[in-house]
Image: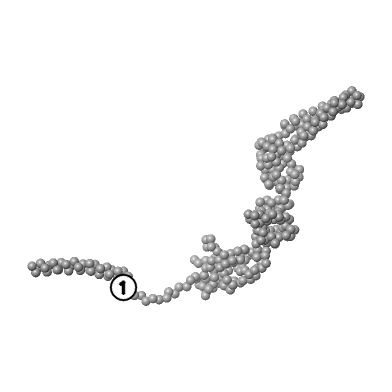
């Protein structure tokens, strides 16, 4: 009996120690993975310096803040003060075409002709009717003087004569519509019809502009209108040909556009015969001086879509993100990213 009791107690003690042994093993495993049993490394300061060492031959530039006149560009489009769109005034097929887009024409030069066969037949018929009416009118006048024609016959003959004369004039005018000539000295913008095509009344056939009277038209914000006055000279920069032009304000539309808060301004350009209608341009306005930072344009480089400069600090070269403004005379305005007194590299060094 005692032996059985001892065996039972032994089994119970063994069952109780199994969970405790598992917990001990788990604790030992956690301690091992966390490095409790490994040799400790003493903490130290890592000697890291950002950037790279300043090359001995690097050319530097000290950033200076200085007063500069502020430039404001207002976008506009070049148009001719004289532009003519020549429309068809009768229905007829195009017979001949004499011009193409870009051709230079003088006043009276032929542009194109329309088929005038029907018009010539109408003119011939009108001429014949006119001559008959004229002879009848002259004969009736002679008889009337001899008291051989009544007043009614005289009035009828006179009316027929006037009607025939009007028809003849109308037929002559219609015939002139078949010959389209240039109404001015200019350049052909475009031709919108070819030989053999049917021209209908009102259809635009040719457009011409006067290259001697080009102007920039631009919507100017109301807040800048105090800088502009009629008949004053202004500076205009055009995209093609790319150069600076002198202009004169010839018209300022009095109404303010309520959607954009701008006023339409027209500026006549000098020596702009080579400029084409539709050319993109800028009206350059300058306000009073203000403090600004300008650095050599060569100091700025791109990293993807970002604009960067290289700043010298404690003998090391660091990259700096900047935001640039207007470029002029090899200089570029820095709107943010640099301060007065900082040193930058004029020609950035690209790390290999």
Q: Nearer the viewer, residue 182 or 170?
A: 170
Residue drawn at point x = 57 percent, y = 67 percent: 336
Residue drawn at point x = 87 percent, y = 24 percent: 150
Left or right, residue 182 beside residue 239 = right
In this view, which residue lies farthest toward the top? 148
Q: Nearer the viewer, residue 93 or 335?
A: 335
Q: Nearer the viewer, residue 310 or 162?
A: 162
Relative height, residue 183 to residue 45 (above, below): above
Q: Is residue 139 visible?
A: no
In this view, which residue lies farthest toward the right? 146
Residue drawn at point x = 31 percent, y = 69 percent: 33
Residue 288 position, x and y percent, is: 67, 67
Q: Quadrant of the N terminus?
A: bottom left
The residue labelled by disc 1 is: 36
Say few, some or many: other residues with alpha carbon within 10 Å of mark 1 (under 14 / 14 to 19 / 20 or more): few
State which quadrant residue 330 falls in.
Answer: bottom right
Q: Nearer the viewer, residue 239 or 99?
A: 239
Colour scheme in use: one colour
Relative height, residue 12 to residue 222 (above, below): below
State which quadrant residue 170 falls in.
Answer: top right
SS label for mark 1: loop
State which quadrant residue 290 falls in.
Answer: bottom right
């Amino acid at each position: 009996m005692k032996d059985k009791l001892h065996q039972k107690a032994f089994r119970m003690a063994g069952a109780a120690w199994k969970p405790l042994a598992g917990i001990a093993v788990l604790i030992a495993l956690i301690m091992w993975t966390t490095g409790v049993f490994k040799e400790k490394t003493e903490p130290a300061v890592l000697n890291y310096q950002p950037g790279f060492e300043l090359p001995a031959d690097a050319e530097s530039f000290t950033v200076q803040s200085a007063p500069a006149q502020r430039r404001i560009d207002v976008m506009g489009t070049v148009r001719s003060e004289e532009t003519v769109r020549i429309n068809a005034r009768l229905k007829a097929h195009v017979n001949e075409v004499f011009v193409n887009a870009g051709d230079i024409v003088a006043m009276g030069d032929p542009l194109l002709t329309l088929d005038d066969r029907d018009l010539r037949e109408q003119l011939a018929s009108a001429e014949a009717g006119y001559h008959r009416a004229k002879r009848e009118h002259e004969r009736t006048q002679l008889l009337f003087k001899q008291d051989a024609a009544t007043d009614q016959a005289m009035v009828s003959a006179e009316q027929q004569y006037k009607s025939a004369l009007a028809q003849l004039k109308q037929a002559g005018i219609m015939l002139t519509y078949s010959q389209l000539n240039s109404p001015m000295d200019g350049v052909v913008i475009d031709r919108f019809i070819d030989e053999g095509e049917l021209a209908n009344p009102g259809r635009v056939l040719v457009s011409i502009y006067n290259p001697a009277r080009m102007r920039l038209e631009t919507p100017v914000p109301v807040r800048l209108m105090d800088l502009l006055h009629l008949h004053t000279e202004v500076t205009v920069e055009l995209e093609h040909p790319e150069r600076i032009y002198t202009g004169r304000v010839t018209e300022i539309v009095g109404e303010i556009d309520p959607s954009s808060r701008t006023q339409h301004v027209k500026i006549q350009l000098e020596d702009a015969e080579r400029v084409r209608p539709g050319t993109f341009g800028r009206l350059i306005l300058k306000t009073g001086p203000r403090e600004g930072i300008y650095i050599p344009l060569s100091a700025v480089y791109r990293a993807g879509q970002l604009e960067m400069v290289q700043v010298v600090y404690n003998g090391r070269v660091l990259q700096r993100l900047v935001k640039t403004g207007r470029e002029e005379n090899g200089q570029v305005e820095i709107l943010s990213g640099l301060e007065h007194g900082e040193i930058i590299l004029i020609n950035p060094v690209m790390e290999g």
